[in-house]
């Protein structure tokens, strides 16, 4: 089981060390707050100024706290950190608290600008050599440092907007309240007290600037970004997908980061293409600033999730069967090639101009039977027993997801994990033969889930029956 694996034991050991250190160096906190503080703040302390962020991963955070805790405690400097490593994991993902928060494991509140510069140097020396993600939009103290800095609020202040939301604010030199933007290192009027980084090296030739023009960011998170871009490296410009895997981005307890995941996806895509599966073609790949970039084909079309969301009416049964056959065939080919997708869902299935479904996103794919502690997948498409380590690399995980995809195509809804509402109750016109296949695919008994190729054959039989019935109805009307 996953909980008894080496990775799980390591996670438990690190979490216990973190908790013990927090109890000693960060005693102030409550269950309602994400943060724990070294002490209560004083009214004599500034409300805003230059502050420091120290980046860390879930693997390095306990050791970093072990070093900076006694140092900052002895100086009486206020600092904070997440209440648990799981919260740090969420911060570093960029999904739960925003992309601008990535990497902000520790926040230090120096009393003056001079203290800020001195503390940055001392903390840099204390933590030199630890791996850490970059903090978006902050300035890095040194090119090899996990210390970053920005100008912002020390105490939480906000204004209420017309729609009821709140905007965090700071005061400008005239006393006016302005947004405390996390997308810059500070406002123009805030004089930067830090000297230029003497360790910075000239930037290497940048293939991003030379060969690509990014049109838009499709996703942006701790492990890296996915961008739609134009590739100018060939004889003719072409649309592409540029996928970035960041070094130390979203490090998990098994030590894997964004760099590792995107590089692995390149190997998976290459293997699947060799088996004739129509995954995106790889155009190129390269390393830059310690990150790994993968350039792939841009598939023109609409993913199934968007297709269903923009429709006013549900898909006809025959259309569901046609699409279901294509999804099942993709899953069948993957399994025949020896792979488990682990992320079969409408958002990862693009309907191209030729009405063919193309699968994308194989970052979490693994070989059948491969032992892996890497949790992957999307909540709605995972069965209840997903936490079993051996089960994660079993094809039945994809078969369950296939059932959820077909359920969604039929009803426009996602099934509940336990006691899902039968398809018939949500769409009475659905033939019982289709309902039975969906029920079998989503069965909690993995042995009852039919293989993907069997689903293809059964859906084909049902589709032929639907077509024959339609022809008879047409003749009867004539």
Image: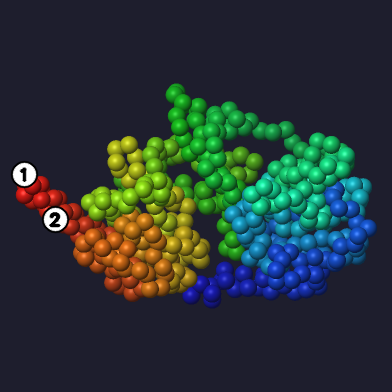
Q: Quadrant of residue 457?
A: bottom left
Relative to residue 309, is residue 422 drawn left or right?
left
Is residue 198 visible in this depiction of the protein?
A: no
Answer above or below: position of 294 versus 410: above
- Identified at 66% across, 66% down, the residue is 85
Q: How busy is the neighbourhood of tag 1: few (under 14 within 10 Å), some, or many (20 plus)?
A: few
Between 196 and 313, the residue placed more toward the observer is 313
Q: Quadrant of residue 3?
A: bottom right
Q: Position of residue 8 (x, y in %)?
A: 57, 71
C-alpha span from label 1 to label 2: 20 Å
Q: Quadrant of residue 282?
A: top left
Residue 465 marker:
2
Name the residue furthest top. 235
**Mark 1 or 2, nearer chain start:** 2
- Identified at 78% across, 73% down, the residue is 23
Relative to residue 361, is residue 29 drawn left or right?
right
Q: Position of residue 400 (x, y in %)?
A: 36, 64
Residue 478 marker:
1
Element type at marker 2? helix
Answer above or below: position of 93 versus 355: below
- Identified at 63% across, 73% down, the residue is 12
Relative to residue 234, is residue 407 drawn left or right?
left
Q: Quadrant of the C terminus?
A: top left
Is residue 387 visible in this depiction of the protein?
A: yes
Q: Position of residue 328 (x, y in %)?
A: 29, 55
Residue 256 marker:
none
Answer above or below: position of 110 versus 24: above
Between 477 and 454, the residue placed more toward the observer is 477
- Identified at 69% across, 48% down, the residue is 161
Mark 1 or 2: the one toward you: 1
């Amino acid at each position: 089981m996953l909980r008894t694996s080496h990775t799980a034991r390591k996670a438990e050991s690190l979490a216990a060390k973190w908790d013990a250190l927090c109890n000693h160096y960060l005693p102030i906190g409550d269950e309602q707050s994400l943060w724990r503080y070294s002490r209560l703040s004083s009214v004599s302390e500034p409300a805003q100024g230059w502050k420091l962020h120290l980046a860390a991963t879930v693997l390095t955070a306990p050791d970093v706290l072990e070093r900076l805790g006694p140092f900052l405690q002895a100086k009486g400097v206020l600092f904070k950190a997440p209440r648990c490593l799981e919260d740090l994991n969420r911060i570093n993902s960029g999904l739960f608290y925003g992309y601008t928060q990535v990497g902000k494991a520790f926040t230090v509140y120096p009393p003056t600008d001079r203290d800020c510069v001195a503390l940055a140097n001392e903390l840099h020396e204390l933590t030199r050599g630890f791996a850490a993600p970059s903090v978006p939009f902050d300035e890095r103290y040194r090119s090899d440092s996990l210390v970053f800095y920005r100008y912002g609020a020390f105490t939480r202040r906000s204004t209420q907007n017309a729609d009821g939301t709140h905007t965090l604010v700071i005061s400008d030199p005239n006393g006016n309240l302005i947004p405390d933007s996390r997308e810059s290192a500070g406002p123009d009027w805030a004089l930067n007290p830090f000297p230029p980084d003497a360790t910075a090296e000239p930037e290497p030739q940048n293939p991003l600037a030379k060969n690509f023009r990014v049109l838009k960011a499709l996703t942006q998170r701790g492990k890296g970004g996915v961008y739609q871009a134009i590739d100018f490296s060939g004889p003719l410009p072409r649309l592409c997908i540029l996928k970035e895997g960041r070094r130390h981005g979203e490090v998990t307890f098994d030590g894997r980061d964004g760099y590792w995941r995107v590089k692995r996806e390149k190997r998976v895509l290459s293997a699947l293409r060799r088996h004739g599966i129509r995954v995106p073609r790889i155009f190129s790949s390269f390393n830059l600033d310690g990150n790994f970039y993968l350039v792939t084909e841009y598939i023109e079309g609409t993913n199934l999730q968007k297709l269903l969301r923009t429709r006013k009416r549900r898909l006809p049964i025959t259309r569901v069967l046609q699409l279901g056959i294509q999804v099942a065939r993709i899953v069948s080919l993957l399994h025949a090639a020896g792979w488990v997708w682990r992320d079969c869902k409408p958002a990862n299935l693009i309907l191209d101009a030729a009405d063919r479904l193309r699968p994308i996103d194989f970052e979490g794919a693994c070989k059948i039977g491969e032992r892996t502690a890497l949790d992957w997948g999307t909540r709605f498409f995972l069965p209840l027993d997903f936490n079993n380590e051996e089960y994660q690399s079993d094809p039945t995980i994809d078969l369950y997801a296939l059932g959820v995809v077909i359920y969604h195509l039929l009803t426009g809804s996602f099934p509940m994990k336990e006691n899902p509402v039968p398809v018939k109750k949500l769409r009475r016109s659905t033939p019982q033969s289709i309902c039975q296949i969906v029920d079998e695919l989503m069965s909690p008994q993995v042995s009852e889930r039919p293989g993907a190729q069997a689903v293809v054959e059964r859906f084909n039989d049902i589709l032929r029956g639907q077509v024959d019935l339609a022809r008879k109805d047409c003749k009867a009307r004539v």
